[in-house]
Amino acid sequence: MLFQPTQTLRRRTRMASPPGCEHYVRSCLLKAPCCGKLYVCRLCHDAEENHQMDRFKVTEVQCSDCLTVQQAQQTCQQCNAEFGEYYCDICHLFDKDKKQYHCQPCGICRIGPREKYFHCDKCNLCLVSSMRGNHKCVENVSRQNCPVCMEDIHTSRIGAQVLPCGHLLHKTCFDDMIKTGAYRCPLCMHSAWEMGTHWEHIDKEIALSPMPTEYQDATVKIICNDCQAHCTVAFHVLGMKCTGCGSYNTAQDGGLIQPPAPPQEQQGEGAEEAGPDGEPQEQQEEVEGGEPLEFEPDSDSDEWMDAEAEEEAAEEAPAQ
């Protein structure tokens, strides 16, 4: 139900929004200490104004039932209406009961119950109890903006997703990110969740997709984004697998490394085969009996005729 202030109240206080909003369930309006306007909550104020409301400096509220402006408290001093099932007198938060609790180190109220959460001093935020001693600490991690939307995480009403690397994203931003196929932390490139099943799928695809002959022996240097290992692995267009942790979340470090080409054999006229001692070896043709064939010149050649004439002359010559 919308709140309709009287004309007298309009003159005394400037109204900026009706009671009740999309953010909180409450029966009062906060009087902004910065501009004196009445808003249901600080988020409504910040969306309308060009400045932000400091929730910790709020001292006055207005009852949505009797319109009495009074000191900030849980129950109306005039009509005893309850402004909220939960009230924090530090944050001046009014809302229905969600098992909220005020975390002193965080400095704000968190949705509980308290016994299911603990405050990590190094990360400086509240985490679920199951992550005690089971998460990677990043100092003051919640004081950084979400790397996807660049909005505040620490005071956001949107839940945060804690990645294995320790960085935080808004849960809604994380869900949107994985819908696009992205699987790495936007800050450090570490895998954002357990990828073992996906790596096995890539193993099978690579086994069924051999590289062309000219690339089958090529290797490449890589850096693993998950374990930070540096290694040299076989090149494949579908992915390079880290030999340290088995992850395909890797980055190529340099160009392809081809194996050295085999030495070329000498070819050409007059080339002789080297023997065991490195000296040229005469080629000899062997017959079935194992004896080498002597060279026999062509019977029609002049050399053959000259040799026969010399033999005849030697036989006819008288002995001396």
Image (spheres, rainbow, N blue to C red):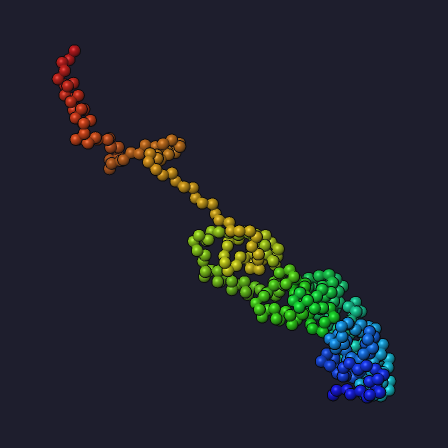
Q: Position of residue 90 (x, y in %)?
A: 82, 73
Spot occupied by residue 30 in the image (x, y as percentages of width and height): 80, 79
Residue 127 vs 284, above or below: the answer is below
Which of these two is toward me, 264 or 281?
264
Hey, which residue is sitting farthest top in the picture?
320
- Residue 300 lies in what quarter of the image? top left
- Residue at 24% x, 37% y is 288
The residue positioned 66% from the left and 71% from the top of the image is 171
Quadrant in the picture for residue 104: bottom right
**Residue nearer the viewer, 272 or 2:** 2
Q: Is residue 267 above or below residue 46?
A: above
In front: 220, or 101?
220
Q: Is residue 12 toward the left or the right of residue 170 in the image?
A: right
Q: Quadrant of the N terminus?
A: bottom right
Q: Is residue 75 visible?
A: no
Q: Position of residue 219 (x, y in %)?
A: 51, 51
Tell me what residue is drawn at x 27 percent, y 35 percent: 285
